[in-house]
Image (cartoon, grey):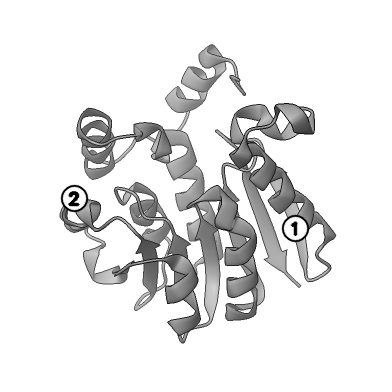
Amino acid sequence: MTLIDEALEQYAEQMTTPESDALARLNRETHVKVEQPNMLSGHIQGAVLSMISRMVAPKYILEIGTYTGYSAICLAQGLQEGGQLHTIDINEELSDMCHRYWEAAGVADRITQHIGRGAAIIPELNQVFDLVFIDADKAGYNNYFDLVIDKVRTGGWIMADNVLYHGDVILPPEEQSRNGKAMHAYNEKIKADSRVEQVLLPVRDGILIARKL
């Protein structure tokens, strides 16, 4: 399902600050060489992540799901002086590509990469985070939220990507894909959690932003 008219999407891109050279090259290389390039945040969403990070000015960020490192660059742009972004991914094969572009973007010294399963790594992180971005296996979102909520400061933010999942979330249950069901369950979970207030932004494939009360 197309969530926004293609012409409007192009117009939005034209009216948005262009990608940096490093991001543009990473965008292209991901689409040429890496499987499932649709997983990349891309120009508009990357700009949204960067803008939110700059507004929050976090000291510590946790990203669950690195892929080729595009969103990590965008998020790291808003870090305070001396801040650090921790990013977790299970795929070690893309690590060299990530680090190459983090160096090119000038943020490599602000990013710590962890290779492995998020459910195993998150409990070992002895850090209070200002901002969390979840963009990993959809069936794991509920667990990731439960693992991070106590590691987020009061007033901190938890963002989750793909929460509209190509429009699957509004289909009848019997027509939803497995990931669509998982995203709807996550949205309902956040809506019912009295520890947060939230807004769902229909940007790209949907970003749900929850603020810890």
Q: Earlier in the sequence, mark 2 or mark 1?
A: 2
Q: Residue at x 65, y 70 (%)?
A: 146
Under circle 1, the secondary element is helix
Q: Residue at x 56, y 49 (%)?
A: 138
Q: Quadrant of the N terminus?
A: top right
Under circle 2, the secondary element is helix
Residue 182, disc:
none
Residue 190, disc:
1
Q: Is residue 82 above or below residue 17?
A: below
Inspect the image, locate mark 1, and give the three-letter code of the amino acid beneath it: Ile
In this image, 87 relative to 101: left or right? right
In this image, 72 relative to 103: left or right? right
Residue 98 in view here: no
Q: Quadrant of the C terminus?
A: bottom right
Residue beneath disc 2: 97
Q: Residue at x 62, y 23 (%)?
A: 3
Percent x, y for residue 201? 66, 41
Q: Name the one closer to the observer, 121 or 196.
A: 121
Percent x, y for residue 205? 57, 35
Inspect the image, locate mark 2, and give the three-letter code of the amino acid beneath it: Met
User: Farthest residue in the top direction?
Assistant: 7
Q: Residue at x 23, y 64 (%)?
A: 108
Q: CA distance from mark 2 to mark 1?
A: 34 Å
